[in-house]
Image (cartoon, grey):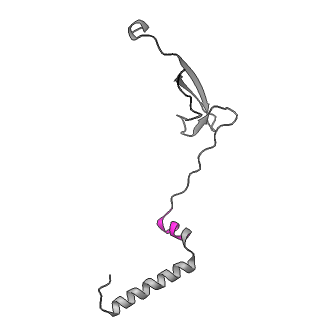
Amino acid sequence: MGEAERGEAAPRQAVTYFCVNSHRSVITFSVEANVPDSWDCPKCGLPGGLDSENAPPPPKIEPYKTHLAYVKERRSDKEAEVILDEAIQLLRSRRKSGDVVF
């Protein structure tokens, strides 16, 4: 099919993005479209920018934290000891009164 059957192609612009790994990605946009400042590199997945000399840095990836790690951020060791002592005293008092504690 030629352009006569499909109609005229919309005017386009080619924009080049550069990532930290020196990959070059040429993305085609409509002339009327707003060109984004960054675009993910199709080769490595890192963000690419418009400036070849100053590519955006890779995003900082936080390691997975367990529930215990979050609790330790909020509580000091002394606070944890107090809470543990209170829980142990409660369990012991319930056992003495005959409650079934698992």
Image vertical order of residue 48 relative to residue 102, above or below? above
Q: Is residue 70 magenta?
A: yes
Image location of residue 66, percent across then percent down? 48, 64
Image location of residue 52, percent across then percent down? 67, 32
Residue extending farthest bottom = 96
Q: Nearer the viewer, residue 51 or 90?
A: 90
Q: Is residue 31 magenta?
A: no
Image location of residue 97, percent across then percent down? 32, 92
Which residue is at 51% across, 69% downward?
Answer: 71
**Quadrant in which residue 38 is drawn:** top right
Specify the principal SS of the magenta part. helix
How many numbered circles does the render carry? 0
Tell me the quadrant of the picture where the C terminus can be found.
Answer: bottom left
Residue extending farthest right = 53
Image location of residue 5, percent across then percent down? 38, 8
Image vertical order of residue 83 relative to residue 12, above or below? below
Which residue is at 60% across, 31% downward?
Answer: 17
- What are the residue bounds of the magenta stretch? 65-72
Tell me the quadrant of the picture where the N terminus can be found.
Answer: top left
67 displayed left or right of 51: left
